[in-house]
Each structure stands twice: as structure tokens, then as C-alpha cells.
Image: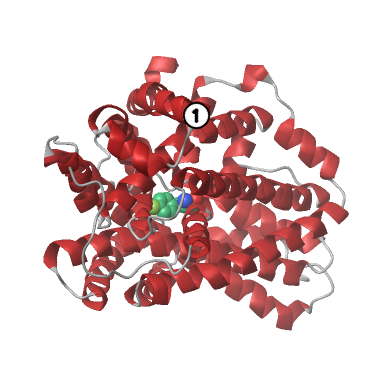
Amino acid sequence: MALSQSGPARDGWSSRTAFILAAIGSAVGLGNLVRFPAEAGENGGGAFVLFYIACVILIGLPVLLSETLIGRHGQAAAPESFRKVAEHSRKSTAWEHVASLGVLSAFLILSFYCVLGGWVMYYIGIFFADIFNTGITGGAFAGVSVQEVEGIFPAMIANGPVTVILNIVFLAITMYFVSRGVSGGIEKVAVYLMPAFFVLLVGITVYGLFGGAIDQTWDYLFTFEPEKLTGPVMLAAVGQAFFSLSLGVAGMVTYGAYVGRNVNLGVTSGVIATADTLVALLAGLCIFPIVFAAGLSPNGGLGLMFQTLPHAFQEIPGGTLIGLAFFIMVGFAALTSSVSLLEAPTAWVIDRFRFTRPVATVMVSVCAAIVGTLCALSTGSLAWFQPLGFIPMFEGMGVLDTLDTLTGKITMPVGALLTSIFIGWVANKRLVDLENGLGGVLHVFWRFLVCWLCPIALSAILLVGIFPSIIE
Ligand code: PFF
């Protein structure tokens, strides 16, 4: 049994730090900055947050390590890596279809993620223009009514040409970096943008904390009220943990494939999960003080970032600049994630059809632009098109919401569930142990989580996601 790979020199991360930054870049994204605070707001603050942290440690982290180790062992695109692990374990190579499903999920998420990236670019433009209208000292949007500020969002998402063009621009930027390869493009985005992201996040958080409202924020985020920990809240927390760690979509398998053998995957996965969770918590500590200081109450959903926050920036000193810095920061996070979403299907096209990287990147991007256009229009003129509307769980949903729900509630949990079964029960134990970099108690605990807790919890999530009436 061959436990190590050799072959032609491949492009890969130039260092362990580059891999960690790129993986953190993939994990930290709109999920941390838009979804996490909004979900915490919608689902009762502390109950959600604490359960979320438990999910990251007990379910997310074991699957993250499983995915990166499959990639590192296979040293190839995700399906090929699954196939190699299966082959070297003398098991059916049909397991590669788990990764094919992941590649498809990554593609679908990419298609709507870039639409959201386009919205963020729109807000960067709005705050930038506001510097010339309002100046930089007072609150943002001087002389503009609250209704108008909050009305920017519905007007933008209903404007088809704007959302379609911005989606394509965001996708084109993503495509540029992916087409330049792992060390020449993907890694560069992470190495430059992630530090800039952290500086902005910490800077805005400190600013918000000085504005007061820290007590209110702390109570809101960390007061644990067990009665608020209901079935739907737990479900939301688990789903968010997976989305946030970029799991179940072949992305981390793909990134793992470019990691050298000298890297301890157990330790690095811990670093990645910790950083991702800290950013989610910091995002809460960054956003809510600004919202509370402006005397507003946090709402859930996209309205928190695109309506409540711009309104809050109106009320605080220097709101234009802080708002601009904030949306630039969100844009950086979105780009390092979209790059990983594009890389998974691109690596697959390169491996499978032997196209050059630039050709493969353009092909996948064009397809994503087509699906993305449907997503971009689904919040406006194409809202009537509800492709899976005949199924209760997709009722009333346009293309964007349908893809979000389909990936978040079905394909990602299925991918993660099958990955944990594959690593826990199917793959050769010696092969897995050689790759995972864990020892002693940690190793036993990880095995228990991958073999038992992850499959059981993920099956439950899947069932409840598809048949919500089970817990109603
Ligand atoms: N983790 C990203 C976020 O929190 O926004 C989203 C994501 C990126 C999901 C990459 C999946 C993925 F492969």
C-alpha cells in the first residue's frame, strides 16, 4: 500500500503560513461578517453563540481535519484525492462522488456568493462617494433621511443591470487571481488581504468599543439563556459552523492538496478553526456596539449589514470613513473566500480534462456568471422564477435563496456526513493516522468525534433541515 505520493512537481503553497492564511481566508468571509451576527441576532444571542462554539469544536474541527488530510494524501483535485484514499484503503472508488458533490456545491455557492460580493462593492462605492458629499468628520450621509439610507438596499437589489454587472466584476477579480495559480495568485490574495483584513477588523472594533455600548453588546452576545436554545437555533448554529469553516464543499480538500508533508494538519486545522471563530466573535463585537451606540436594535438577515449598519454609520462621528473601511474589510473577506470557491471546481476541470489553468478558470467562471446572473436577477425582475418552488422547503424562493438553501441544508451537510463516514469507517486507519498529526488523548477523542458524533449530528441536521416539522 502506497502511503505517500510522488509525481511531477505541482504548484503549491510556498510555506505553512501561506496555507494557513489561505485557509483562514477561505473560512473567514461573508459567513462570519454578515451571517454570524445576523443569525446570533435572530436566534437569541448567547444561546446561539455558545452552541455555535461547541459545534465548531466538536463537529466542524474533526471534519476540517478529515478534509485537509484527504487532500494532502491525494495531492490532487478533491474527487481524485478521495479516489486515491479509497484505492489505498482498498475500498470502492465510488467514494470520489462525495467530492464531486462537493465540487458542485462549491460552484453553486460561488454563483450566489459573487452576487453578494457585488453588493458589497456597491456599498464601498456609496461610502466612497459620500466622502465628497459629507466629508469625513461627521456621520455618514449628511442630510439624507433614514428612510432613504435604508432604502438604498431594496433599490439596489431590485436593479438588475447593477447587480448583474457588479456580480460579473467581482467574479472577474476572483478569476484573475485563481488563473494565476496557487502560489502566484491564490496565495498572494491571502497573504496581502488577510493581514489588512485583521487590521481593519481590530481597528473598527476598537473604535466601536470606545463609542460605548460594550456592556449591552456583551450581554447580547454572551448571556446564556438556556430556554432560547431551541431546535431551530441549534440547527442554525450547526449549519453556520459548517458554512463558516467552508466544509462539505471540497474547498478544504482542494487546499489540503497543496500542503507539504512536513505540515502538522491537526495543529493547523486547530489554528484555522480558532481564527475563524475569533473573527466571527470579533465581527459581533465590531458591529453591535456601533448599532447599539446609534440607539438602534439589531435586526436579523441581510438588513443588519445593508440597512441597520449604514443607518448606524449616519449617527456616529467619522461614520463615512468607518463605513468605507468596514465595507472594504467585508470585500477583502469575501474575495479570499470566493477564490477558494472557484479553485475547487477549477482544480477539478484541470485534473479531469487536462486543460491549462487559465482556460479552466475562464470556463468555470463563465458558467458561474450565467448561474450568477439568474441569482442577481432573482431579487428583482426574476423573482417570479422559483425553480424548486414546488418542494415545500424551497417554496417562494427565487434562484439565489434556492441555491443558498439547497447547499446549506442539503449538499453541504451530506458532503460533510459522508466525509466523516469515509474517514471514520472506510479509509485505512493507518493511512489516516499517518496524515492527521494527532497523538495520545487528542487522537482518541478525534476518532470518537469523526466515527460517532459527526455522523450522528450531521444525520440529525440533515433530517431536521429537510423535515423541519420533526422538531416543531
Ligand atoms: N466560509 C465562507 C464564509 O464564511 O463566508 C463561505 C465559504 C467559502 C463556504 C468557501 C464554502 C467554501 F468552500
Residue 26 x %, y %:
46, 57
Residue 467 x %, y %:
34, 23
Q: Residue at x 14, y 36 (%)?
A: 90
Q: Is residue 53 left or right of residue 458?
A: right
Q: In which quarter of the image is residue 36?
A: top right
Looking at the rendered image, the quarter that the N terminus falls into is: top left
Q: Depth check: 395 or 269 in front?
A: 269
Q: Which residue is drawn at 57% across and 29% down?
A: 54
Identify the element where label 1 is drawn.
helix
Q: What residue type is labelled 1?
A: Gly
Q: Residue at x 49, y 71 (%)?
A: 189
Residue 275 x %, y %:
59, 49
Looking at the rendered image, the quarter that the C terminus falls into is: top left
How many numbered badges does the structure rendering display?
Answer: 1
Q: Is residue 352 above or below residue 234?
A: below
Q: Is residue 96 above or below residue 313?
A: above
Q: Quadrant of residue 298?
A: top right
Q: Which residue is drawn at 36% across and 67% down?
A: 12
**Residue 225 visible in the displayed image:** yes
